[in-house]
Image: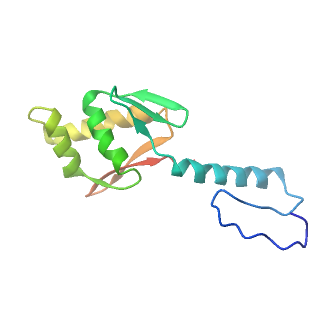
Amino acid sequence: MEAGARPPVCNDPFEDWVRAPISRDDLDARVRALQNRLDSRQIPTLDSAGTLTFGSHSITVSNVQTELMELLIEHFGEVVYRHELAQRLAERVQRPTRNSLDLHIMRLRRRLASTDLVIRTAWGRGYALEVEAR
């Protein structure tokens, strides 16, 4: 944008403007911010074979992990209460222990390490599947 020109109104969260000249660092920062906005609107997909896809990343998860991921994806970006996840786990595992859910969440976190997704703990409530902040 030319110096002294009136800035446009940006109604789209994926639109941005700058005044020329701009440093390369400032331009890179704005591009990263726009990319983060775009990434945060994508939702992961999970097929019946247990393949989770998000952006350009795909991983496979076990049948039990698929059940848990379905619930986390259904409420993507929101907290899923621990008792809801434990109930879903109980449908797949005979006599699950209290630590069973913790173990499966730990394993899912390891599997998700190669993606841009993380499972965050909401202490005293449950877990949320979110895009990892860069």
Query: Does residue 121 sit above or below 66 in this rendering?
Result: below
Instruction: Indicate whether 18 appears above or below 38.
Output: below
Front residue of this view, candidates 57 and 118: 57
Q: Residue at x 33, y 33 (%)?
A: 107
* Side of 12 where 17 appears, left or right: right
Q: From the viewer's perspective, is 38 left or right of 97?
A: right
Task: Give the percent coordinates (x, y) of residue 106.
Answer: 32, 37
The relative height of residue 73 versus residue 124 in the rendered view (above or below) is above
Q: Which residue shows up at 51% across the image and 40% down it?
A: 116
Q: Quadrant of the N terminus?
A: bottom right
Q: Is residue 11 above or below residue 58?
A: below
Query: Left of 9 or right of it: where is 37?
Result: left
Residue 3 horizontal/vertical position (percent): 91, 68
Kindly identify the residue that appears in the image at 75 percent across and 49 percent down: 28
Res. 133 visible in picture: no
Residue located 17% across and 33% down the image: 92
Q: Answer yes or no: is residue 58 visible.
A: yes
**Residue 16 location, quadrant:** bottom right
Q: Quadrant of residue 67?
A: top left
In front here: 88 or 101?
A: 88
- Relative to 96, 69 lies left or right: right
Horizontal and vertical percent for residue 53? 46, 34
Identify the image's colour scheme: rainbow, by chain, secondary structure or one colour: rainbow
Percent x, y of residue 6: 84, 74
